[in-house]
Amino acid sequence: MNLIAIETSTSYCSLAVAGGDRVLARHILAEQRHAEIALDELMALLSEAGQKLEEVQGIAYGEGPGAFTGLRIACGMTQGLALARNVPVLGISTLLAVAEESGAANVVVCLDARMGEVYHAAYRKEQDVWREVCAPGLCPPAALPQVD
């Protein structure tokens, strides 16, 4: 199955193209240039993978939490591409994606939300399934909920 993934909720623009057992990814420090670079970078990544947009069978995107403008960019790109291709879409929690990438079974995720606050959540992986231990939230670092 040929899939693409788009994540623009942080200062990085992260894109991936998967086909068969091959995954190509790019993580570009975009700051506030996501809208300028995301589509061109995605098309270049598809080309590098030897795929065409017409061959994409599904799209995943980072649904946040994160920067509101960044979330709109990923969501808007996904919506436009999915409607044009009539393919399914899957929103992925940015916090859960960070937990998965950590490789650990018990994870507290904190991402800078700016203005002295963090987005946070805690997860436990049991038999390859993530369980939410502390629901996603937003607070100052000193007010983070305590978790086991």
Image (tube, grey):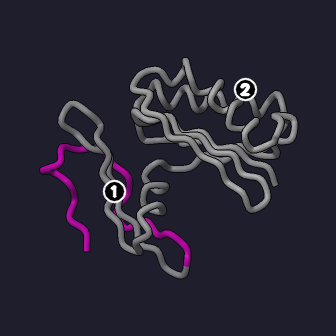
For the residues marked 2 and 1, what is the alpha-carbon distance in whole angstroms?
A: 30 Å
* Magenta residue span: 128-148
Whether residue 105 is in magenta: the answer is no
Identified by mark 2, the residue type is Gly
What numbered label is drawn on residue 109?
1
Q: Quadrant of residue 35?
A: top right
Vertical arrangement, residue 120 with respect to residue 114, above or below: below
Instruction: Residue at 67% x, 54% y: name it.
Output: 23
Residue at the far top: name it.
36
Residue 65: % across, % down: 42, 41
Q: Residue at x 41, y 75 (%)?
A: 105
Q: Which one is earlier in the sequence, the residue at label 2 or at label 1?
A: 2
Magenta-colored stretch includes residue 133: yes
Are there few (<14), some (14-19), or many (20+) residues within 10 Å of tag 1? some
* 1 on left or right of 11: right
- Tell me residue 116's x, y (percent): 18, 36
Identify the amino acid type marked 1.
Answer: Val
| Mark linked to residue 80 | 2
**Label 1 secondary element:** strand
